[in-house]
Amino acid sequence: MAREVPGRLNIRDEVAALKRERTVSAAADLFYENGYDNTTLDEVAERLGVTKPFIYANFGSKSELLAEICERGVKAALDEIEGVLAEDLGPTDSLRLFGKRYVTSILMNQKNIAIYTREEKNLEPADARRLGDMRRRFFGQVASLLQAGSDAGEFDLEDAKMGALAIGGAVSWSTFWYRPEGRLEVAGIASEMTRLILGIAGAKRAPIKRKAEATAV
């Protein structure tokens, strides 16, 4: 009898994870194309070529599916700011790196972000509160980065919280005009939007030394 390797999914778990991913992907496509209210679980099942019990094995309701889709989008953004802040970079370098990663992540999760923006009103109250807390944490950390840059004399802006909201709004809105088959590639959009993000912050210079190196000089 084969032993399970610690930390590795067994075949049953892998199959369950695959079914869950297929369900989320199909639902996201339909919610994005037709809207949440105009999509039924029967249609999700039809898109998958299965019956509804396949869906109910992982999600108890359509609203639970919506929450999963929206959470993935919000988490993608939160992961990027937390990842950048964990690196030993100064404010301008951090914002530049965050901009590229954030824009790229948002565009790669285009449907999730667009669905959350359009369908937040349809979330169950508990899910709406939970995702709202995640969003506030995201904007709070972006605002903290902007404030650190302002305090260090690297950014020229008066209201870090407003700056964070402006950056988030501009990047999130790109999910409504970006087309994967269009003339603009993700890398090019990320580069240009990062330049705009630095402009919103009023970035004055681009230091190349890490804080630890600067302290050691």
Image (cartoon, rainbow, N blue to C red):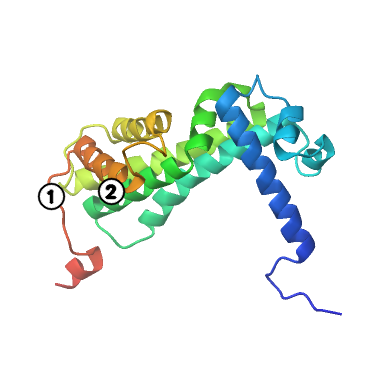
Residue closest to the eye, 163 or 194: 194
Q: Nearer the viewer, residue 100 or 182?
A: 182
Going 51% across and 40% down the picture, which residue do you hit? 74
Tag 2 secondary structure: helix
Q: Residue 95, position in %: x, y?
A: 28, 48
Mark 1 lies on residue = 205
Read off the residue under disc 2: 95
**Label 1: how many Cα within 10 Å (few below 14, some 14–19, many 20+):** few
> Percent position (x, y) of residue 62?
72, 30
- Disc 2 + disc 1, Cβ < 8 Å: no
Residue 116 percent coordinates (x, y): 53, 30
Q: Which mark is residue 56?
A: none
Q: Residue at x 76, y 64 (%)?
A: 11
Q: Quadrant of the N terminus?
A: bottom right
The three-letter amino acid code for the residue at tag 1 is: Arg
Which residue is drawn at the image coordinates 65% and 19% (left, top)? 38
* SS assignment at label 1: loop
Work out which quarter of the rendered image holds the C terminus and state it.
bottom left
Q: From what the image shows, is residue 165 above or below residue 5?
A: above
CA gap between label 2 and label 1 equals 12 Å
Q: Residue shown at 28%/36% (left/top)?
A: 160
